[in-house]
Image: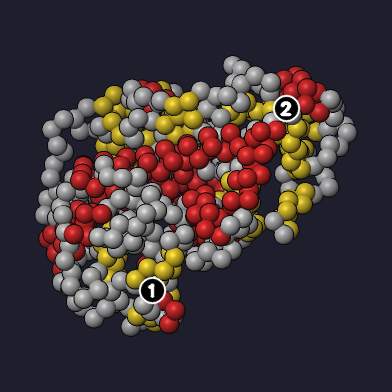
């Protein structure tokens, strides 16, 4: 039986990103993927939001994606546009890039990182024991791993086999999406009728002034609502024609489909992201309507939160309890995504009363403050993990995990607003030359960035685990205050401890003392002097 430290089930966006994170941390990781190639039927997700673009920038691979996609103001709430061009980020926009291209580029990077992918194999089940997990495959010998991660999509076998509950809300709406040829050309674009929203487009497009301009040729992409939510079974061309005739009075002579699928507004979330040695990420952990384009982005960011933690546990740097912070931090993020998509589905109804409500919400979202707040939410730039106590030097991770909404925007006067938020990608000046903060994260290793007096803290007990960088802020505008999305200016810190996922784990006091730093280092990056991480707690 072949062994790996970590086996990931599913080589979609989440599984690929997690594999890259683990490979960067030099963990023996492999993916099992039932598709024979990375090719994807249909185009699915249409792009990336700003925080996902930043996450790829943190790893030094963002240009691969930017060069193949189209940068634009694509953000919106229930299709009400949210311009974020004035946001304090290097990427104040979204990226139009079909999921098929996203996966191809990501898989190319994962290939360079030499992650083995068992293609054309399906995981059929697993058995967990005290030291690992035996994984049963549809073909060939099974695999054994210390940890198994289910990145196997919304119908996740891993979630079901681990007996993890998937509570939520049943579907109230259902739509067909398809790529077909049509005898007559429909009017391209999004249409609102009494039946709901339907749309026609083409695979190839340009974004000009925020508008989609489709190419004149090529198959037609269709989205059309069905009369009743969520019928069972795979949809057919006949179902598509019937739905088009109901809504448009014609099926435009639809024929030769290359892809037909159905999506609903069902919203469900795994009750636990971890059960023993089994973890869930991406659609396996949360499903919801595609409105707002959150699914792929949330999955990729789950992977970036989990990757370094799992690596440290596998390498015995940190205790297994570090993995509980994955659920504690990411479950509330997806719970908020679910509620936001439910709100958007409600606002997209086309009856007169909802149209009136939509007008009112549109008016609100044109105001600066609500626009910034919602754009920060939809772009993922406002995500805030509740790490509050570490700034005060408290050792207990668990105390910070059950606090108020971890993505709540309300600043707590006792802790620095940067704590738990993403580090801005500022320009720095170091002894070896100019540098961007994100460059320090390319290797997915933690960084203690010291902007105060050089060498103010002895990092020796964490040497080899945490990078130390003395730097000055290169731009005068960053001296004194730093600008955060939606929050605005916050006091510039003297030092910050940055986790590999780009979130701030500790903020230096204004007087230059390092209170709380040893506790934060131990909590997130293991005990001092490489002491043994506590072994797995008895269950
Ligand atoms: C119509 C539509 C539009 C969407 N639009 C957007 C959008 O605009 N923006 C956005 O962010 N998201 C969007 N989404 C959602 C997005 O497609 C998903 O959130 C995303 O694909 C989730 O990635 P994942 O890797 O978690 O899961 P998946 O992409 O589902 O990948 C799971 C992988 O696991 C493999 N697998 C499953 N079971 C097994 C098994 N037992 N053994 C081996 N392999 C297995 C599958 O083959 C697959 O490759 C859309 C989805 C749909 C349907």
* Whole-percent x, y for residue 161 in the image: 36, 22
Which residue is denoted by mark 2 in the rendering? 195
Closest to the observer, 2 or 176: 176
Q: Distance between the residues labelled 2 and 1?
A: 50 Å
Residue occupying the point 54% across, 37% down: 343
The answer to which of 112 and 16 lies nearer the viewer is 16
Q: In which quarter of the image is residue 475?
A: bottom left
Label 2: which secondary element: loop
User: What colour-coding does the image apply?
Assistant: secondary structure
Q: Do the residues labelled 2 and 1 touch (CB within 8 Å)?
A: no
The residue indicated by pointer 1 is 481
Of the numbered discs 2 and 1, the one sitting upstream in the chain is: 2
Quadrant assignment for the C terminus: top left
Residue sitting at the far right: 184
Residue 2 drawn above or below residue 480: above
Residue at 36% x, 77% y is 480
Q: How crowded is mark 2: few (under 14 residues within 10 Å), some or many (20 or more)?
A: some
Q: Which mark is residue 352?
A: none
The image quadrant where one finds the N terminus is top left
From the top left corner, tell me how far across and down residue 427 is, in percent. Answer: 43, 75
Q: In this view, does 494 lie above or below 521?
A: below
Element on which disc 1 rests: strand
Q: Is residue 144 left or right of residue 257?
A: left
Residue 239 in picture, x, y percent from top left: 72, 20
């Amino acid at each position: 039986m072949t062994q790996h430290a970590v086996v990931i089930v599913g080589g979609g966006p989440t599984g690929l990103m997690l594999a890259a994170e683990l490979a960067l941390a030099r963990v023996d990781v492999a993916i099992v993927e039932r598709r024979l190639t990375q090719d994807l039927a249909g185009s699915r997700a249409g792009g990336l939001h700003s925080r996902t673009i930043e996450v790829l920038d943190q790893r030094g691979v963002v240009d691969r994606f930017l060069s193949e996609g189209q940068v634009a103001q694509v953000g919106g709430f229930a299709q009400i546009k949210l311009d974020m061009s004035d946001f304090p980020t290097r990427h104040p926009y979204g990226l139009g890039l079909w999921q098929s291209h996203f996966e191809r580029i990501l898989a190319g990077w994962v290939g360079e990182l030499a992650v083995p992918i068992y293609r054309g194999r399906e995981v059929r089940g697993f058995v967990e024991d005290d030291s690992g997990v035996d994984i049963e495959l549809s073909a060939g010998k099974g695999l054994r791993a210390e940890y198994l991660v289910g990145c196997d999509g919304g119908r996740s076998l891993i979630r079901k086999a681990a007996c993890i509950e998937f509570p939520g809300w049943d579907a109230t709406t259902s739509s067909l999406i398809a790529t077909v040829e049509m005898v007559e050309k429909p009017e391209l674009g999004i249409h609102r009728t009494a039946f709901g929203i339907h749309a026609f487009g083409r695979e190839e497009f340009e974004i000009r002034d925020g508008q989609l301009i489709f190419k004149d040729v090529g198959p037609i992409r269709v989205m059309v609502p069905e009369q009743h939510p969520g019928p069972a079974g795979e949809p057919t061309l006949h179902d598509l024609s019937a739905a088009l005739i109901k809504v448009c009075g014609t099926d435009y002579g639809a024929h030769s489909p290359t892809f037909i699928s159905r999506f609903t507004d069902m919203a469900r979330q795994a009750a636990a992201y971890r059960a023993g040695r089994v973890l869930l990420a991406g659609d396996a952990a949360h499903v919801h309507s595609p409105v707002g384009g959150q699914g792929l982005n949330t999955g990729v960011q789950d992977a970036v939160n989990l990757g370094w933690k799992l690596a440290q546990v596998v390498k015995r740097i940190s205790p297994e309890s570090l993995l509980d912070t994955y659920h504690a931090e990411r479950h509330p993020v997806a719970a908020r995504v679910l509620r936001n998509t439910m709100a958007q589905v409600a606002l997209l109804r086309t009856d007169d009363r909802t149209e009136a409500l939509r007008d009112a919400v549109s008016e609100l979202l044109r105001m600066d403050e609500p626009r910034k707040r919602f754009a920060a939410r939809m772009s993922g730039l406002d995500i805030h993990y509740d790490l509050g106590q570490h700034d005060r030097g408290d050792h207990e991770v668990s105390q910070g995990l059950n606090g108020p909404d971890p993505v709540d925007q309300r600043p707590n006067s006792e802790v620095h607003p940067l704590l738990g938020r993403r580090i801005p990608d500022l320009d720095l000046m170091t002894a070896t030359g100019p540098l961007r903060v994100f460059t320090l994260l390319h290797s997915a290793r933690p960084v203690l960035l010291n902007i105060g007096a050089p060498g103010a803290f002895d990092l020796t007990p964490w040497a080899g685990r945490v990078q130390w960088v003395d730097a000055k802020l290169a731009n005068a505008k960053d001296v004194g205050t730093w600008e955060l999305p939606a929050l605005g200016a916050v006091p510039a810190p003297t030092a910050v401890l940055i986790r590999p996922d780009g979130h701030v784990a500790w903020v230096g006091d204004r007087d230059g003392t390092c209170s709380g730093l040893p506790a934060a280092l131990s909590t997130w990056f293991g005990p001092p002097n490489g002491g043994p991480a506590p072994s797995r707690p008895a269950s």
